[in-house]
Image (tube, grey):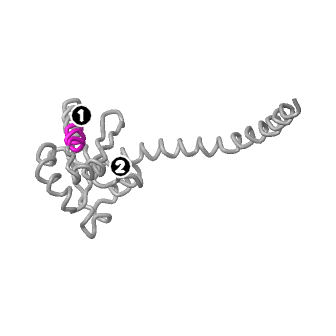
């Protein structure tokens, strides 16, 4: 009986503390979401303004022997007319592609950010395709994941191109 009273007293003490933490953190969470929302709008607008008409896909990769041949010889020939391609192995890519650099940092983040494809869909929506894990699996003899990711990208690009025309 006494242990129930002590547990009940602990809840009475903990509840206001939890409520205070939530009230303090809520504005920061709100600002985080607002910042992500306006950042998204900023980069979509910036890319659309700086790219020629008909370009709505950003592909970024390095000259790794694992993925560069596949991207250059298999993937890009299918969708190149709609792509802005950034080779991150080049020394001056950050100066040459300033808007793309910011967008890649914003949408790519720190997780599996290379190689990556970002498709700017209608109405400001985007779709991000991360290829790192797929290429890692391919290195170990499992190419199914890569084929699925690549086919989803090609399908998404074709659907977006069809909607835009």
Which of these two is toward me, 110 or 13? 13
User: Which quadrant holds residue 124?
Assistant: top left
Residue closest to the far front: 1
The numbered disc on residue 46 is 2
Tally of numbered tags: 2
Is residue 102 rendered magenta in the image? no
| Earlier residue among tags 2 and 1 | 2
Q: Circle 1 sits on which residue?
A: 160
Relative to residue 127, is residue 75 drawn left or right? left
Which of these two is toward me, 75 or 43? 75
Q: Quadrant of the N terminus?
A: top right
- Residues shaded magenta: 144-152
Q: Secondary structure at mark 2?
A: helix
Q: Secondary structure of the magenta portion, mostly?
A: helix
User: Which quadrant holds residue 26?
Assistant: top right
Residue closest to the far bottom: 91
Q: CA distance from mark 2 to mark 1?
A: 19 Å
Is residue 151 rendered magenta in the image? yes
The residue that appears at 82% across and 35% down in the rendered structure is 12
């Amino acid at each position: 009986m006494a242990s129930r009273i002590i547990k009940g007293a602990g809840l009475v003490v903990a509840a206001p503390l939890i409520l205070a933490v939530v009230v303090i953190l809520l504005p920061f969470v709100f600002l985080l979401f607002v910042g992500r929302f306006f950042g998204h709008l900023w980069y979509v607008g910036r890319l659309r303004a700086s790219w020629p008409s008909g370009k709505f896909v950003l592909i970024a990769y390095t000259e790794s022997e694992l993925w560069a041949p596949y991207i250059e010889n298999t993937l890009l020939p299918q969708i190149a007319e709609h792509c802005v391609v950034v080779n991150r192995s080049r020394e001056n890519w950050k100066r040459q592609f300033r808007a793309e650099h910011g967008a890649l940092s914003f949408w790519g983040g720190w997780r599996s950010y290379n190689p990556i494809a970002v498709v700017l869909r209608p109405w400001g929506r985007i779709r991000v395709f991360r290829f790192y894990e797929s290429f890692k699996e391919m290195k170990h003899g499992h190419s199914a994941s890569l084929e699925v990711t690549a086919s989803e990208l090609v399908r998404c690009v074709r659907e977006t191109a069809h909607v835009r025309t």
